[in-house]
Image (spheres, rainbow, N blue to C red):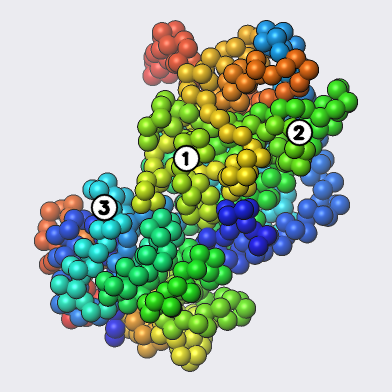
Amino acid sequence: MRLMVHLVAGFPSRAGFAAAAGALRNGGAEILEIQIPFSDPSADGPAITLASESALRSGFRTVDIFDYIRIARGAGFERIMVMTYANIPFRYGVEKYIKDMRAAGVEGLITPDLPLEDTEGYYRLALRHGIAPVPVAVAGMLPARLKMLRPYKKIYVSLRTGITGADTVISAAVKKFLRGLSGAGYEIYGGFGINKAGQIKALSPLVHAVVVGSYFTRTVQKAASEKKDIYAAVKSALGKLTGS
Amino acid sequence: MPEYFGRYGGQYVGEVLKPALVDLASAFAECRKDKKFLAEYKDLLTHYAGRPTPLLYAENLTRALGSAKIYIKLEGLANTGAHKINNALGQALLAKKMGKTAVIAETGAGQHGVAVAAACARLGLRCEIFMGAVDAARQQPNVFLIKQYGAAVNIVNDGTKTLKDAVNACLKRWSACYADAHYLIGSALGPYPYPDMVKFFQGVIGRELKQQIFQRERRLPDVLIACCGGGSNAIGMFAPFLKNKKTRLIAVEAGGAGNKPGQHASRICRNSPAGIIEGYKSRFVQTADGQAQPTRSISAGLDYIGIGPELAALADSGRIEFTLAKDAEVLRAYRCLARTEGLLFALESAHAAAAALKIIPQLPKNKIAVINMSGRGDKDIFITAPALYKKEWLEFLRQETERLCG
């Protein structure tokens, strides 16, 4: 199984982030998705929203992301994705954002509210500068919109409608959707609300990497508020998912 | 592209919401031309909302200022106390035609929430209103009213716990429930088709006004003045006049307590930059990095970071002039209109009145100006009374508390 794990930059602190990243890498996670905090994260649940607010209150600035990318690399991550919302690259300058991320060695960029119609030129420019734009797909997308994924290689699939809580029921429709994308040659990162080993086991054969999002943010939040060791807490949380 | 207004607008949402917006845009495109739908909507406006709202010749104010002839469009007389009902009824009816059984909506001051809850009760739709915890705390009377109409109130504890956070919460919820539910946005903003749809339903203000003023004066007005938060009453009043270049259109933003960041809610007058937030591109009160900044206004309804994309475009092109009114000026205008014309303006609408008191004295006598009283001020008693009547109000609250805790 290959995991893409997620952390919010600047949360709970620079040192806390470094500890969490270290624990995730040492625990076997292959890809790290770092989220640039944004004040209005319209596609995130309460844990990531709170973490983003906390990082911003502590003074996080967009340029600080490059420091966090270095920390992640120092922790041993060779594969790093950067996720955020449209207003961050828009204010930073879309082309400069892409170039600077490329120069920092980032593999892919995820910006869920920049639409596939590419009105800001983000997808086009990312391709041109040799960094993967990673569109977010959902099961049930209409064929006309599925076609719009063609220029891209790596696809993030949000499975919120496919996985139902503890029972890890991956519906036949979602399985078919994932198989269809893999069959078409895409590299699929799939997840949404993953927090149990059984879910990962069921999803692994269908995707390039299983995405574990807010699970670790919740772990970090709990450890930080209880003044416990973040490295140990994250290591143990990851162990529960991977069964090691 | 049709979903853009100049360089603003668009549909900046995740793929998960795309089908909902596509369905909504096509349903709206059909309904706006459908005679049966329009007849039903008109019937609701006439017999339920109480339209047409009067256009009052403000004789006393005209005499007091001694310049242009002043009219006031009394939107505050519509059922539920503000123009918000025009859009709430239109979208709720559209939701019903689309086969939806529920409506979700955000509210800041609570006026939109009240209008939506009432419209849903009238049309037999389930209703859930999202409200930031800070807004809910300071607008408890409206929370109560929303519940009286049978709607559920969902308190949002994210971010600044105000309107923008309620919008985000609605977007999140909608992506999980759009098969059965319509998201009823209250201002002329959000991803396409909302800006167009809200303009269409609020356009009744301007269409009526055009007829009324023509009947009275046999000509079009020279100046229209409306307050502008998200901008639904402004674009609704201005829409039928956009092509009449001789009519000056003036939108009034919330100047708050001062010019510094965090003290106002002005996008245009304070040169807030362009951004992409909550599904649309427009101008937002934000930091250099693009993080939403806290806003402030004495009127909860204008206390919002964004502005409708079409209004931002019309500001860029110069077709709409923007000015602002500060909290203190707003309170003065509120008192002035109550005393001269017997009209209790909502604090939002009192921004338009405050600007009018400065602008109208500079106009020649043969001009005609119209102020939009978008809402009435009864709802603001918990803001206006402490500001203007503090000692007595405190005593009253103390007595009431004692009596209730008895």
What residue appears at the point 32 percent right and 77 percent down from the top-left corner? A107
Side (left or right) of A101 relative to B340: left
- Image quadrant holding the C terminus of chain A, namely bottom left
**Residue corresponding to mark 3:** A60
User: Given this view, does label 3 or label 1 mark the residue nearer the observer?
Assistant: 1
- What residue would you read off at disc 2? B246
Q: CA distance from mark 3 to mark 1?
A: 24 Å
Q: What element does badge 1 sit on?
A: loop
Residue A174 or residue B341, whichever sits in front = B341
Left or right, A116 with reference to B338: left
Look at label 3 and name its amino acid. Answer: Phe
Real-space CA distance between mark 3 and mark 2, rounded to the nearest whole angstrom:
49 Å
Kind of residue at badge 1:
Asn
Please, which chain is the residue tagged with disc 1 on?
Answer: B
**Dividing the picture into quarters, in which one does residue B50 lie?**
top right
Callout 2 and callout 1 share a chain: yes
Q: Is residue B201 above or below residue A79?
A: above
Tag 1 residue: B271
The circle on residue B188 is none
Residue at point 14%, 62% (across, down): A230
Q: Nearer the viewer, residue A243 or B86?
A: B86
Q: In the image shown, does A170 or B165 lie closer to the viewer?
A: B165
Q: Secondary structure at mark 2?
A: loop
CA gap, disc 2 and disc 1:
26 Å
**Other residues around mark 2 within 10 Å, as few (<14) / some (14–19) / many (≥20):** few
Counting from the top left corner in percent of width and height, residue B406 is at: 39, 15
Label 3 lies in what chain? Answer: A
